[in-house]
Amino acid sequence: MAVEVHPTAIVSPKAQIGDGCVIGPFSIIGPEVTMGAGCVIGPRVSVEWSKIGANVNVGANSIVGGDPQIYNWKKVSSWVEIGDGAFINELTAVHRSMYEGKTTAIGSGSYIMTQTHIGHDCKIGKEVTMTTLAGLSGHVEVEDYAVIGGAAGVHQFVKIGTMAMVGGMARIVQDVPPYFTVAGNPAESHGLNLYALKKRGVGPKERQALKAAYHILARSNLPVTDAVKKIEDEMPVEGIIKVLVDFAKNSERGLTL
């Protein structure tokens, strides 16, 4: 299929655009862009320094691959990478890495709602949902299937675990463990994201074990290291329990409990 470029759009002859892509009015596609087949770029979109998979949508007035927001940054060759089937809605900004040859990444199937911000060097897993006005500072990591609620703000270098749910308007300054639901300012844990666990096929026995581990980690008032040891002593550390324990052990910012 031919590429459809609106007459008012500017597409660099050096850009590599896949079959069947549609480039909307007044959009700008820079020379350092590769784009897989079937992408739809809305009106007034700027795409620079990006490696985009197939069937990706980018909504109107978005900026993908803009320079990182750093004082006195010296320009280097760096990227944004977007996986197949990701959907980026209107007025979103995704900034490329601050480091030579490095990337800011959005995983396949992720759904990024309108007016969100993804700072430089963030790593977003597959099928992550970011809700309107949510913002990620630089170097944030969001694991697969997590959900970030509207207007939530995430501090730089924070990690958000797989299937975690961050409530709307939450202030996240410490790591969010996998499977947890957190909310508030400052954020606190409010149980498990049972909807995601059921949706992803986690059975009742595993969910029950995870509930027990949650209460030890978040409600026992033990220091994290002691809580982790108690979990290891009292239950098999495998499957989702191992994921949770490993996350807690490797946290550098502390946990949102």
Image (cartoon, rainbow, N blue to C red):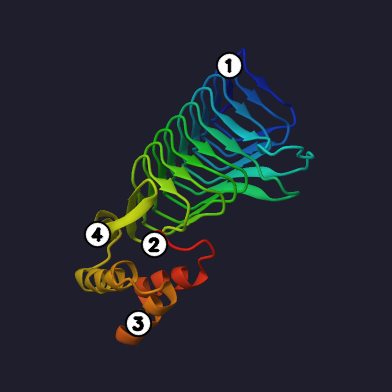
Asked if marks 2 and 1 touch (Cβ < 8 Å), the reply is no
Marked residue nearer the N-terminal end (2 or 1): 1
Residue 124, compared with residue 179, is above or below; it is above
Total tally of numbered discs in the picture: 4
Q: Residue at x 61, y 13 (%)?
A: 7
Q: Secondary structure at mark 2?
A: loop
**Nearer to us in this view, 19 or 16:** 16
- Residue 255 percent across, percent down from the top left: 43, 62
- Binning the other alpha carbons within 10 Å of mark 2 as few (below 14), some (14 to 19) or many (20 upward) gives many
Q: State the quadrant of the N terminus.
A: top right
Give the Cα separation between the discs numbered 2 and 1. 44 Å
- Asked whether residue 192 appears in the rendered view, the answer is no
Give the Cα separation between the discs numbered 3 and 2. 18 Å
Q: Is residue 180 left or right of residue 4?
A: left
Disc marking residue 232: none
What residue did someone put label 2 on? 178
- Binning the other alpha carbons within 10 Å of mark 1 as few (below 14), some (14 to 19) or many (20 upward) gives some
Give the number of the mark in front: 3 or 2. 3
What residue did someone put label 4 on? 198
What residue did someone put label 3 on? 230
Q: Secondary structure at mark 4?
A: helix
Marked residue nearer the N-terminal end (1 or 3): 1
Marked residue nearer the N-terminal end (4 or 3): 4
Q: Secondary structure at mark 3?
A: helix
Q: Residue at x 52, y 36 (%)?
A: 117
Disc marking residue 6: 1
Give the Cα separation between the discs numbered 1 and 4. 44 Å
Q: Secondary structure at mark 1?
A: loop
Give the Cα separation between the discs numbered 1 and 3. 61 Å
